[in-house]
């Protein structure tokens, strides 16, 4: 089984990658912005067409989305935490419609926290 983990160098992604890589029969692909990633991608800026092509080329059986951000203003948080998963869903539907999606998120998906 080919599993693409997006955000594999982050806190959640690192833990997910560690667990999945220990499973027999799993071919793990790391996806994200880090130089060590197998698949270089930034969900905040990628176009649906480019992501569709990338997914068609890598042909994952499953995608685990751990990519996200907890820093920044409302627009930056929306681009990474809301736009990114929406583009990912669109691209997966077009390129790998039978692949499974596991999306892990945080409260930052809803915008910056107000402390008061």
Image (cartoon, grey):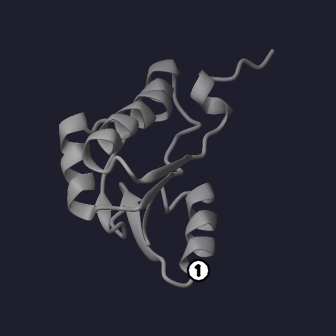
Residue at x 19% of width, y 43% of height: 50
Direction top: furthest residue: 116
Direction right: furthest residue: 116
Residue at x 81% of width, y 15% of height: 116
Looking at the rendering, which quadrant does residue 91 occupy?
Answer: top left
Q: Is residue 57 left or right of residue 15?
A: left
Q: Is residue 81 visible?
A: yes
Q: Quadrant of the N terminus?
A: bottom left
Closest to the observer, 41 or 95: 95
Tell me the crowding category of disc 1: few under 14, some 14 to 19, or many 20 or more residues within 10 angstroms, Cα based: few
Image x and y of residue 59, in percent: 29, 61
Q: Check disc 1 and report the residue beneath it.
A: 23
Q: Is residue 76 left or right of residue 111?
A: left
Direction bottom: furthest residue: 24
Image x and y of residue 63, in percent: 45, 55
Q: Is residue 42 left or right of residue 16?
A: left
Image x and y of residue 11, in percent: 61, 58
Q: Is residue 30 above or below residue 91?
A: below
């Amino acid at each position: 089984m080919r599993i693409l983990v997006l955000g594999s160098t982050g806190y959640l992604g690192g833990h997910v990658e560690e667990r999945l890589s220990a499973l027999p029969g799993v071919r793990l692909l790391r996806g994200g912005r880090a130089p060590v990633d197998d698949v270089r991608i930034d969900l905040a800026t990628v176009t649906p067409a480019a992501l569709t092509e990338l997914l068609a080329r890598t042909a994952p059986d499953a995608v685990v989305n751990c990519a996200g951000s907890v820093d920044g203003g409302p627009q930056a948080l929306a681009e990474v935490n809301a736009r990114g998963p929406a583009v990912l869903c669109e691209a997966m539907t077009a390129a790998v419609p039978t692949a499974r999606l596991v999306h892990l998120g945080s409260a930052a998906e809803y915008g910056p926290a107000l402390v008061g």
